[in-house]
Amino acid sequence: MRALVIDDSRAMRRIVTSILTGLGYEVRDAGHGREGLDVLDEGWRPDLVCVDWNMPVMDGLQFVSAVRSNPKWRSVTIMMVTSESEHTQIVRALAAGAHEYVIKPFTADAIRDKLALLGLLPQEVAL
């Protein structure tokens, strides 16, 4: 399985990448939403995108809207991984097309549990 991790914090990209790699994902990363769209434009198709909300150039909500507006990318599962914890923000992200929402700080188990809910745990991990 493939994942794209989008966050302007290099440390946060490493943390999420480490968790996903440990679960069996092949991971690419990007520093903001525009870079994430560039990865998709190259033809690399992830099963999952983990995207932060607050980033320069293109924020996470703009990224979600851009992905959902492109028919070739509509099947990509998107999980917001962000410090935005207000209920209205969560509703906005889900309404824009995100499938799940994880609030920072989080644990590896929290990410794993969300992936299990989404049906995106690789088989070896799910057993």
Image (cartoon, rainbow, N blue to C red):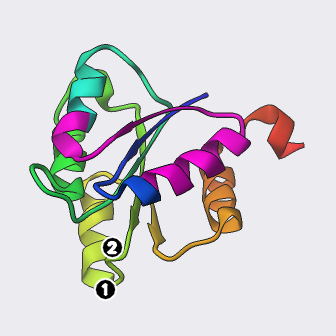
Residue that carries the numbered disc 1 in the rendered image: 86
Please state which of residues 83 and 18 is positioned toward the viewer in this rendering: 18
Quarter that holds the C terminus: top right
Is 104 covered by the magenta stretch? no
Residue that carries the numbered disc 2 in the rendered image: 90
When the figure is inspected, residue 50 is found, relative to residue 21, above or below; the finding is below
- At 72% across and 43% down in the image, what residue appears? 23
Q: Which residues are magenta?
A: 12-35
Distance between mark 1 and mark 2 Cα atoms: 7 Å
Q: Position of residue 113 (x, y in %)?
A: 68, 61
Is 14 covered by the magenta stretch? yes
Q: Amino acid at mark 2?
A: Ile
Q: Position of residue 121 (x, y in %)?
A: 70, 42
> For the residue carrying disc 2, how many other residues have a C-alpha within 10 Å: few (<14), some (14-19), or many (20+)?
some
Q: Position of residue 52 (x, y in %)?
A: 33, 59
Q: What is the secondary structure assignment of the residue under circle 1?
A: loop
Please state which of residues 115 and 74 is positioned toward the viewer in this rendering: 115
Q: What is the secondary structure assignment of the residue under circle 2?
A: helix
Count of numbered labels shown in the rendering: 2
- At 41% across and 22% down in the image, what residue appears? 45
- At 22% across and 32% down in the image, what residue appears? 37
Q: Residue furthest left?
A: 57
When the figure is inspected, residue 84 is found, relative to residue 28, above or below; the finding is below
Relative to residue 27, is residue 75 drawn left or right?
left
Q: Amino acid at mark 1?
A: Glu
Q: Are marks 1 and 2 in contact (CB under 8 Å)?
A: yes
Quarter that holds the N terminus: top right
Q: Residue furthest front?
A: 11
When the figure is inspected, residue 81 is found, relative to residue 3, above or below; the finding is below
- At 25% across and 81% down in the image, what residue appears? 88
